Amino acid sequence: MFEEIEKKYGTPRKLTMTFSMKPGEFDMLQNSMRDGRNSDVTLFIFKGDKVIVIAKPWYPEGLYRAPSGGIKPGEDLELSAKRESLEETGTEIKLLKYILRINVTFICDEKKTRWTSHVFTARYLRGKLQPIDKEEIKRVTLLSLEELSSLKEKLLAQGSGGLSYRAALTEIAIEEIFSSYRE
């Protein structure tokens, strides 16, 4: 299933993680999976020396993260990445490198749900930094990797298992990006 995408964009580092969620958050995740979705694509899109980041409507002021979105059942991973970039950031991109495949288990009481994140670096090609899906995204901006990394504590302070996962994913992705620049 991943052979073709790995030939094109490299073999990602593979990780397994587990995070706890509160009942309401866990139910929201499970509702989002009703159509068979069980994975997302997360994008670190470079425009110059900064990355394009998004804020959800319920995020406190100043909280951002890398854009991501669910992969529809049967949808091509590359097409999903390009679709999500356009929907969430208003931009067209060129995928560069497949850096991470994270298998995460979310736990709530005795219930478990498995999810996979496919993380890519990409380069901005064109488009206005403005979400097309304005119900899902309230703001798009540019941050340096250092500025994005500094938001970890703000993500963790929200008390959300999903945002704690996003904080860990971001930290590892930034490490991978920096290590590939050194290679």
Image (tube, rainbow, N blue to C red):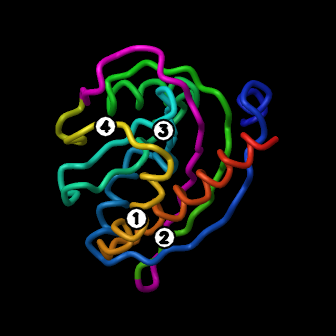
* Label at residue 106: 2
> Residue shown at 24%/42% (left/top)?
136
The residue tagged 4 is 141
> Contact, CB < 8 Å: mark 1 with mark 2?
yes
Disc 4 and disc 2: Cα gap in Å? Answer: 29 Å
Q: Is residue 118 magenta?
A: yes
Q: Is residue 58 left or right of residue 86?
A: left
Q: Is residue 53 left or right of residue 56?
A: right
First-in-chain label (4 vs 1): 4
The residue tagged 1 is 162
Label 2 secondary element: strand
Disc 1 and disc 2: Cα gap in Å? Answer: 8 Å
Q: Which residues are magenta?
A: 109-132
Is residue 173 or residue 137 the one in the foreground?
173
Spot occupied by residue 72 in the image (x, y as percentages of width and height): 46, 36
> Residue shown at 67%/33% (left/top)?
97
Label 4 secondary element: strand
> Residue shown at 43%/18% (left/top)?
92
First-in-chain label (4 vs 2): 2
First-in-chain label (1 vs 3): 3
* Label at residue 71: 3
Disc 1 crowd rating (10 Å Cα; few below 14, some 14-19, many 20+) is many
- What amino acid does circle 4 point to? Thr
Compared to residue 182, the image places residue 95 above or below, namely above
Is residue 142 or residue 122 the one in the foreground?
142
- What amino acid does circle 1 point to? Gly
Q: Tell me the mark number nearer the camera, choosing from 4 and 3.
A: 4
Spot occupied by residue 140 in the image (x, y as percentages of width and height): 28, 36
